[in-house]
Image (cartoon, rainbow, N blue to C red):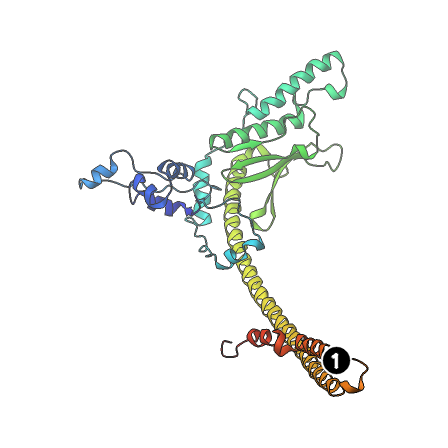
Amino acid sequence: MEREFTRFELYELVWSQPMTTLSTETGISNVALAKHCKKLNVPVPGRGYWARKAAGQPIDRAALPLRFPGASDRTGGDPNRSYSFNRVEEYAEMVIPPEPIFEEEMPALRQRVSKLVGRVRHARDFQSVHSLVAKHLEHDEERRTDYKRSPISLYKPKYDGGIEQRRLLIINTLFQAAARLGCRASMSTSRYVDYYGNDRQLGLKIAESHVGFTIEPLKLKNRGQQESLSLSFTRSSIGDEKSQWSDEDGRLESKLTEILIEMLVTAEMSYRRSLIAKRQWLIDRKAEAQAELVRRQIQAERKAREREERLARERVGRLLTQAKMIERADRIRTYATAIVSRADRINASAEQVARWAAWARQEADRIDPSLNGTLMAEITELPNPAAT
């Protein structure tokens, strides 16, 4: 679908006419329209709706539900379109989309997200586990078997207790709570995951947005201090402000509801910022394209002037050459006439002198611009001032 639709535009479209009619008018199949509606969570008229409407029966139109935090507000268009000066005219003429309008203020969004999340209850054991967490527990069983054979630190189970077990339990709780909301989790499931490497990075795919986060032990200030955990993620949507929670002001397990709410709010803020940034990108590209067209026009005009100046210099050069050639032709003719008049003084027959004179006059005609066509070509090719 080449045209981009917002959720509201698509909603108004599919409730204005039957999809079979719309597919004829828009060139978009009713199957494709239905897929776009499903993608954006746009309700469509049910079976019999248009027949009841045509019969004048009272009917209700399903309301457009609010977007899930971080979900896309639009569909269609060309997602693979990239800026190129080969398409500068297209960018110079493109219509900038209106500034995005968001249906909820942030306080209302936060309140709705709080209701969506409800209360995240921290699980104290692994009786119910997320599939990614289950992989780590499987690796722990493998290590446990290896440790019985060879009791070295490499094979020692990680999650039997201590800070790493706490960390995995918190991850499990967050991942399962997010999964109930339709969010997809990400984490490395390698058996050889580093304790503090990049593969400890965690993430939640919240609709169209990704929120990456970490849960790591805090560095101990002294040996007698109890190990603590800290959870943090960067809220790139609001100036790279970092959100962080730790055990230092209450155990992390008691803050999981607040944390998940903040992640969903961050996903929405990130999406909103991306829409605003995309529009500004288009504004910048259009300005660049228009400036490029002006530059090309100036360059074309400069090249045209340079070409005209070069052609004028060449015409003057040919003019001077023709003047010299016609002067030479006249001198040859004069010389030939003078020789004929002195034929009796030359040791040659009158026939030989006459043949020579004819050749000389022929050569004069050959180089004479008025006779060999070069002057005529200049006259006909000379620009017409009236035409310019």
Question: Residue lying farthest top?
Answer: 149
Q: Is residue 385 left or right of residue 47?
A: right
Q: Which amino acid is tagged 1?
A: Val
Q: Residue at x 59, y 25 (%)?
A: 133
- Measured as percent of width and height from the top left, residue 237 is found at 56, 48
Q: Quadrant of residue 337?
A: bottom right
- Measured as percent of width and height from the top left, residue 26 is found at 36, 45
- Measured as percent of width and height from the top left, residue 217 is found at 68, 34
Q: Is residue 286 left or right of residue 226?
A: left
With respect to residue 64, does 324 lie above or below? below
Residue 211 seen in this snapshot: yes
Question: Residue lying farthest right?
Answer: 347
Q: Residues within 10 Å of mark 1 (few under 14, many from 20)?
A: many
Residue 58 seen in this snapshot: no
Q: Residue at x 57, y 60 (%)?
A: 288
Residue under label 1, please give it.
Answer: 353
With respect to residue 299, does 188 lie above or below? above
Q: What element does badge 1 sit on?
A: helix
Along the line of sight, the residue nearer the viewer: 203 or 332: 332
Q: Quadrant of residue 151?
A: top right
- Measured as percent of width and height from the top left, residue 261 is found at 50, 39
Q: Is residue 363 left or right of residue 81?
A: right
Q: Quadrant of the N terminus?
A: top left
With respect to residue 157, does 4 lie above or below? below
Count of marks overlaid on the render: 1
